[in-house]
Image (cartoon, rainbow, N blue to C red):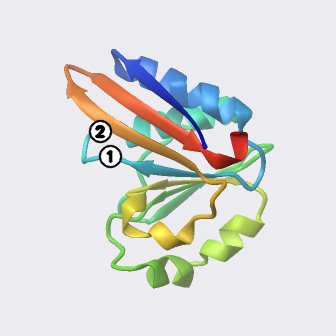
């Protein structure tokens, strides 16, 4: 398991760290995001999109569950806050998204712990106040 701890002092720095990760992601990668409401999960996802070369505005898919952003490597951005179980994630086609060759980023990943393979990136974001964040990024595949 490889991990990094990064502290950011602004939303822009959080986006920049997401962009750095996004530039390293390969088709089929999964990024499981963890953090309280307002922690910066969507900001980090904006950075991932930028790192993938996606220029569209990224917003939280709270009411649609998933937003799709086309690109050389597409981004599938999930917000599963409203789901009750892993079964609901699979019911909306989770396996199909995994097979489409894009990058899947999942907000509120703690709700579906069994949906991720051991090589998924885990990003835990803690709000330290005043736009400061602590990011813990883990990925077993990097070791």
> Residue 119 appears in which quarter of the rendering?
bottom right
Label number found at residue 126: none
Asked whether, in this view, residue 70 is left or right of residue 130, the answer is right
**Mark 2, residues whose alpha carbon is within 10 Å: few (<14), some, or many (≥20)?**
many
**Closer to the camera in the image, 73 or 7:** 7
Q: Secondary structure at mark 1?
A: loop
> Residue 68 appears in which quarter of the rendering?
bottom right
Asked whether, in this view, residue 141 is left or right of residue 14, the answer is right
Quadrant of image for the N terminus:
top right
Task: Give the residue at x 80% y 43%.
Answer: 72
Asked whether, in this view, residue 109 is left or right of residue 35, the answer is right
* As drawn, 5 above or below 52: above
**How many numbered marks, from 0 up?**
2
**Closer to the camera in the image, 91 or 54:** 91
Q: Are marks 1 and 2 in contact (CB under 8 Å)?
A: yes
The answer to whether residue 6 is visible is: yes
Q: Position of residue 26 (x, y in %)?
A: 77, 44
What residue is shown with label 2? 39
Q: Position of residue 57 (x, y in %)?
A: 52, 37
Q: Position of residue 21 (x, y in %)?
A: 62, 32
The answer to whether residue 55 is visible is: no
* As drawn, 88 above or below 40: below
Task: Give the residue at x 44% y 35%.
Answer: 136
Find the distance from the CA under tag 1 to the CA under tag 2.
6 Å
Q: Secondary structure at mark 2?
A: loop
What residue is shown with label 1? 35
**Mark 1, residues whose alpha carbon is within 10 Å: few (<14), some, or many (≥20)?**
some
Task: Give the residue at x 46% y 78%.
Answer: 86
């Amino acid at each position: 398991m490889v991990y990094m701890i990064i502290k950011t002092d602004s939303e822009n720095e959080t986006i920049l760290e997401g962009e750095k990760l996004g530039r390293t992601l390969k088709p089929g990668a999964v990024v499981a995001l963890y953090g309280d409401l307002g922690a910066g999960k969507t900001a980090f996802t904006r950075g991932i999109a930028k790192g993938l070369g996606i220029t569209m505005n990224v917003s939280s898919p709270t009411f649609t569950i998933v937003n799709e952003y086309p690109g050389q490597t597409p981004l599938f951005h999930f917000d599963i806050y409203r789901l009750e179980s892993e079964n609901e994630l699979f019911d909306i086609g989770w396996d199909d998204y995994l097979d489409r060759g894009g990058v899947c980023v999942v907000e509120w990943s703690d709700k579906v712990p069994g949906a991720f393979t051991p090589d998924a990136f885990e990003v835990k974001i803690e709000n330290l106040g005043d736009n400061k964040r602590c990011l813990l990024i883990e990925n077993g595949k990097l070791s």
